[in-house]
Every structure is written in structure tokens, then in C-alpha cells.
Amino acid sequence: MTTLLNSIETLRRTSNRISLGVDDLKHRPLPSLSKLIEVIKLQEQVKPAKALQTPQEYIQQWENYLSGRLNTIEQRAIRFLCWEPVVATDPKFQEYLDTHKVEIRARSIQGLVYSCHRRWSEELAFGSTVRRVRERIEFYSGTKRLIQKWRDNISMLIGLYGPNEFGSLLEKVRQPIDKLCNTWGFDSRTPYVLNAVQCAAHRCRVSLIQDKTCADYLLKVLMLWDGWPEAEFKTEASELILHPFAANDAGFRELLTDFILRDAKNRLGDPRLPGNDRKWLGVSIEARRLVIQWLSRLDIVFFFEHVLPNGKDPHDRKPFWLQYLGRLVQSRPLLCESDRLRLAAVLDRNKDRVVNFGRMRTDNSAFLLDFGNIVAVEFSKVGRVYLYDKGVFEKIIPNFWSNIPFQEQWGLKQPELADASEAHIGHWERRVANVLERYGIRPKCD
């Protein structure tokens, strides 16, 4: 009896294990099926083709056909020539495909679109080549998912306003440019994509006042794109600098200043430094002047709020000099060693704002304000402001941006060479303003 009961219990446990195994199999694909599922998922993804490098012999075949030395071109050569922009966008090439009833498959269609994007222009968009490529896509009956996706979005792909549509998509989804291009099977280094990025940048600028989040996409994605030609990049930089939002929003102005000074590609930099003169060629003069004004404001605030003893400005030197922001050509704080050590934490916090400060040999920091034809020199320890004719100052200090520590006596403090040296007592502001007026320098805050 006991043996029978044990046998029944063994059967019951075995049955339970089998049931659990079946349930588990219901929810877990077999290894072979799992691999198949992954393959299917991969097949469903849109995969752009890599551009083909056309062998010279195939280009020669096309040239021989044009000259009448050849009647037909090899089918293999045709597949490569679809990726050769100059050839593929030639109306005669499209005519050849039609006349010889050449079968155009998915990879060749990708080549034709690539070629159109590479030579994109308004004239091309209006022409017969684009119209014929568009028709080839519309009549495509194959299974390539990318071509099907293109067919469903044909106006964006190759329409007259295609770059504008793609630019609107960029601004809407705010993805990295190369990532979105890859999703659509586009080469990201084409005039078509450049037009799209310019459109996206324009749309972001228009939306800045209503949507501040556009600023991050503008400065951290669109402007950092390495596909910008130099001239177009500088045009976009000018537009951003002169945008009303930059004048009215300190946060955006700070982001923009940081981008200008610390762009990883070092395309602009501090416009006051002689070494950056060439980089700013092509940026509007007004935009460059405005950036100098922003940087000078930061210098003035830093010097008179932090470098002065105890951060106090009893003679209101800061508001006086801020009146002349729009007249400054360049400015530079010069820190003595004790101030540099004392302000280490402040400098670290403001490393994106206070840049290119110099050094003083003595225990008295200084501040240089260059107005083009006259230079003012202030010191952290209350005393006098020295005003030098620019020609005289350049003989004393040949290099405004020198990394060598500056001298106080026999350097920046030479009353016998200065046009004026005014003590910060009484109506000192009026006296200094009169000296500046003689040089045509009047308050202009902008």
C-alpha cells in the first residue's frame, strides 16, 4: 500500500513539473525563434546605403557615351554612376535610363537621391532631373523599407521646399543632426542638409522669446554641427549675437558668450585678442562690437565688485565706467598675486565670464580700459585714474595682452606721461568725463 502511495505522489510531482515547463515555454521563445525574431527586427529597421566610390573606368564610359564613342553603358557602371553627383544630376543621364529602360533598384535610387542632395540648388529642384528621380521613387514597387518611407514623404525628400520641411522636423524633434539624417538615410554633409540646418536655426531663433528651451538646441546642437561652411557659420553667429533675445535675456547671453569663448572647434574666441582677428572676419562688425561690450561689462563688474578691497566701491567707479561700455575697444583686469589667490574661488566660479586677465608685479591690481584713442588705467587701491593718449600708452605698454606681469611704477603709473591723472575725490567723474570728451568719447551704454 505504501509503495502504491509513493508511486502516485511521484507521478503527481512529475505532472506538476511538466505543467510548469509548458507554461514557461508559452512565454519564452525557443533559442532558434529568438534569433529569428531579432533578424526580423533588424530587417524592419531603415538602413541607409553607404555611398559608392565610382571607379574611373565607369566615369570614362559615361564620357565616351556623351562623345558618341560608346552606345551603351554596362549595367554595373550605371549602378555606380547613380552615386556620382555630377553624372547622376545630368538630365542626359536620366534620359539614358529612360531610353534604355534601365531597371533602377533600391540602392541606385538611394544613389540618385544622394547625388541630388549633394548638388542641391533651387535650379536643380525646379529641373527635370529632380522631377524624374521623384517619379522613380513614386513608382517604386520593391520591398526596401527606406524607399517606401521616402515615397511616403516625397516632398520632404526631394521637393522644392524639402530642406525647409526637414529643417522643421529637426527643430521639432531636436535630435542630433547626424542621428536624424541617418534615420532618413541622408548624407549629412550636403547642401540639402545645410539648407535644412539653416532653416532649423532660423525657426529656433524665431521661437526663442516664446520658448527658451530652443537656446540649448541652437547652441549645443545646431551651432556645434561640424558641417557648417565657415561663411555660413559666421552669418548664423551674427544673427544670434544681434538677436533681441540676447540683449534682453541675461541667461541666454551668458550661454552665447560661453559658446563664443569655449567652442570646442575654436571658431571664434575672444574678439579682443589680436590672434582671433582672422576668426572674426565675416562676422558683422556690429555683432563683434556687441560681444566686446558683453565681455567688457563682465570685466568691469568683476573688477569693481570683487577685486576692490572688501568688494566695496565707495567712489562709484563701476557705474561711471558702465556708461562707456559702447565706446570700449578692449578691457583687461590685471591681478596682483595676493588678489589672484584671494579670488581663486571667485575666478573658478566665473571662469566662463572673466577670461584673459593679466598679472601685476606689485601688490596693487589694475584695470585697463581702451577706448581706441585714449586708455584709462584704474587701480584697486583708491588713488587716481590715469588717462593716456593711445600713442603714448603703446610706448609704455607695447602689448596690451602680454602674459608678462605689468609694472605699476615706471609702467602704468606715470603722471608725467599721462594726459591726466584724476584723484577719486570731489566731482572726479566730471573731470574724467571732460578728458574723455576731448577725445570724442561720450557715454554710450547701448
Image (cartoon, grey):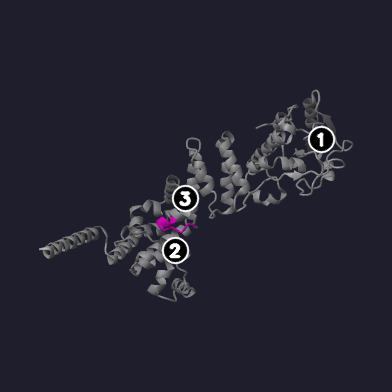
Inspect the image, locate mark 3, and give the three-letter code of the amino acid beneath it. Ala
Q: Is residue 147 visible?
A: yes
Judged left or right of residue 346, residue 209 is: left
| Residue depicted at 71% across the width and 47% down the height | 273
The segment highlighted magenta reads 181-188
Circles 1 and 3, Cβ within 8 Å, touching? The answer is no
Would you name the residue on which mark 3 appears? 196
Q: Nearer the viewer, mark 3 or mark 2?
A: 3
Inspect the image, locate mark 2, and give the three-letter code of the amino acid beneath it. Asp
Sequence-wise, the earlier of marks 3 and 2 is 2
Judged left or right of residue 273, residue 144 is: left
Judged left or right of residue 407, residue 119 is: left
Q: Is residue 243 visible?
A: no
Q: Circle 3 sits in a helix, a strand or a loop, which is it?
A: helix
Would you name the residue on which mark 1 appears? 387
> The C terminus is located in which quarter?
top right
Q: Circle 2 sits in a helix, a strand or a loop, which is it?
A: loop
Report if residue 302 lies within the magenta region.
Answer: no
Q: CA distance from mark 1 to mark 3?
A: 51 Å
